[in-house]
Image (cartoon, helix red, strand yellow):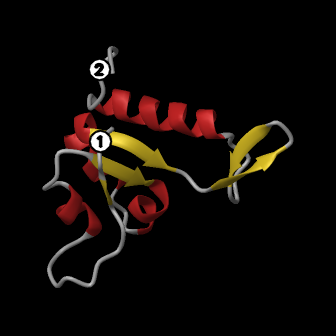
Amino acid sequence: MKASVENVPTHLEGYTPFALVKLFDYVTLDLRWAILYDGLDSFKSIINRVVNVHLRGKLKGDKWVLENSSFCFYEALNKIKKRLEVSGAVNNGT
């Protein structure tokens, strides 16, 4: 089991959510906050330390779908992975 730090909003002056989490060994990537703060691309540099992805969704039929989206949970993860692979942040083995 690994305890991870999530990129949640902060009131610390001069720090973004990403600036705080990049200091830790294990990170939870919260997509909502990363997108809100236009920071998803920042996670490319620490993707090897992301141990958890926080997606908000609900069960629709037999699939978990993201809120306000037609994507199911696994489709969203694959889209993230492909985006990071194209950027060179993710290797085939990870």
- Mark 1 neighbour class, 10 Å CA radius: few under 14, some 14 to 19, many 20 or more: few
| Placement of the N terminus among the 4 image quadrants | top left
- Residue positioned 43% across, 65% down in the render: 33
On the image, numbered disc 2 is attached to which residue? 91
Q: Earlier in the sequence, mark 1 or mark 2?
A: 1
Taking 71 as reference, is 58 above or below it? below
Foreground tag (1 vs 2): 1
Q: Secondary structure at mark 2?
A: loop
Give the residue type that dot 1 points to: Lys
Q: Quadrant of residue 62?
A: top right
Asked whether 40 or 59 is in front, the reply is 59
Q: Quadrant of residue 75?
A: top right
Q: CA distance from mark 1 to mark 2?
A: 22 Å
Give the residue type that dot 2 points to: Asn
- Residue positioned 27% across, 28% down in the render: 88
On the image, numbered disc 1 is attached to which residue? 2
Rendered location of residue 89, percent (x, y): 26, 32
- Mark 2 neighbour class, 10 Å CA radius: few under 14, some 14 to 19, many 20 or more: few
